[in-house]
């Protein structure tokens, strides 16, 4: 079990004073009366990506462990009772700095596979909030959500799911209604933290309709605004597939691309 009764807000945006940080501030305000809350900002931290050198396969340790701040963040996450991860969507995924941290958890995965884990088993709970500038797209949050699901699994955290807010290009897009629903979400999370609520993601998505459940496999996911826009282009091409040195098939693909003037990312 985790050693402390503390909620850790992990703000995984590289942008100081940005949308994610504003969300973290609002959640912290709402949670502070229920629990001790600490905050880690990834912005400005030194975080190097995995080198895939294979050293952790041998002893479960990372060759970069003393060279940056990843291990200190992992320790804080594994010590907390509840980790709330907050990140923006950058190109349909996590920001590069956050992804570097995620990739470095490979040492936990390798250690578990080789049964030479040196880290004491823990089971803190984890929950994620994702924000994105775009207002549309069924899979806007899917990449981030899946990366986090396997990241938390590698670290041994019990992941309750991700909640997403779209249409937030900058902090000012978080108006009074967003602020009210974030405060309400904080109250529900406090109940989850105290063990009173079993499924926080579904409860929050129902009670705060601006939030959506980012899990592509959950029923709540279909609530995402997926309205398609005008079809303005066609791409055609030929894919050749070679099996065992023999060109075995050739398929033509004709894909319609849905796009809009404002939407450059899909
Ligand atoms: C490099 C970069 C890539 C982005 N990619 C996307 C994207 O794929 N989809 C989207 O909806 N918004 C995208 N955005 C917009 C951000 O999600 C949005 O501005 C968010 O509020 C940024 O939060 P932050 O201030 O904490 O960084 C991108 C922004 C940046 C800087």
Image (cartoon, rainbow, N blue to C red):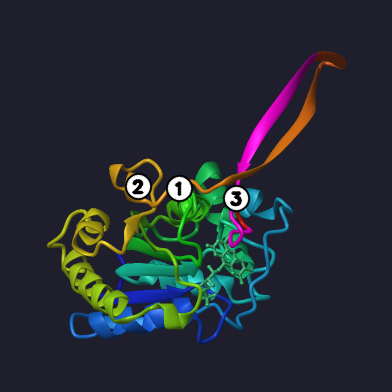
Find disc 2 in the rendering and name its residue.
221
Mark 1 touching mark 3, by CB under 8 A? no
**How would you classify the magenta stretch by its main secondary structure?**
strand
In the rendered image, is residue 97 in sight? Answer: yes
Taking the spot 64% from the left edge, 62% from the top edge, the residue there is: 62
Residue 25 horizontal/vertical position (percent): 37, 84
Q: Which of marks 2 and 3 is nearer the N terminus?
A: 2
Q: Nearer the viewer, residue 17 or 243?
A: 17
In the rendered image, is residue 4 in sight? Answer: no
Q: What stretch is highlighted in magenta?
A: 249-264
Badge 2 element: helix
Q: Nearer the viewer, residue 118 or 66?
A: 66
Residue 111 horizontal/vertical position (percent): 54, 50
Structural crowding at the residue carrying mark 3, measured as other residues with C-alpha within 10 Å and reported as few (<14), some (14–19) or many (≥20): some
Mark 1 touching mark 2, by CB under 8 A? yes
Find disc 3 in the rendering and name its residue.
259
Taking the spot 32% from the left edge, 49% from the top edge, the residue there is: 223
- Give the alpha-carbon distance from disc 2 to disc 3, as whole Å: 22 Å
């Amino acid at each position: 079990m985790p050693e402390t009764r503390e909620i850790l807000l992990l703000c995984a945006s590289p942008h100081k004073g940005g949308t994610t940080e504003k969300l973290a501030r609002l959640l912290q305000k709402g949670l502070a009366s229920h629990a001790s809350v600490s905050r880690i900002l990834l912005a400005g931290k030194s975080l190097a990506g995995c080198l895939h050198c294979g050293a952790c396969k041998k002893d479960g340790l990372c060759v970069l462990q003393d060279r940056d701040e990843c291990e200190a963040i992992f320790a804080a996450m594994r010590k907390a009772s509840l980790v709330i991860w907050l990140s923006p969507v950058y190109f349909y995924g996590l920001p590069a700095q956050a992804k570097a941290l995620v990739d470095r958890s490979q040492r936990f995965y390798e250690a578990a596979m080789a049964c030479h884990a040196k880290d004491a088993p823990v089971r803190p709970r984890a929950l994620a909030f994702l924000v994105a500038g775009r207002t549309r797209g069924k899979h806007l949050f899917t990449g981030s959500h899946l990366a986090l699901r396997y990241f938390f699994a590698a670290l041994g955290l019990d992941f309750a799911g991700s909640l997403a807010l779209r249409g937030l290009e900058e902090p000012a897009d978080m108006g009074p209604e967003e602020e009210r629903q974030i405060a309400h979400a904080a109250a529900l999370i406090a109940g989850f933290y105290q063990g009173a609520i079993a499924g926080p993601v579904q409860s929050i998505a129902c009670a705060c309709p601006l939030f959506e459940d980012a899990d592509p496999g959950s029923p709540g996911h279909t609530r995402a605004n997926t309205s398609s826009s005008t079809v303005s282009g066609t791409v055609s091409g030929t894919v050749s597939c070679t099996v065992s040195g023999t060109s075995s098939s050739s398929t033509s693909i004709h894909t319609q691309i849905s796009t809009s003037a404002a939407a450059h990312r899909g």
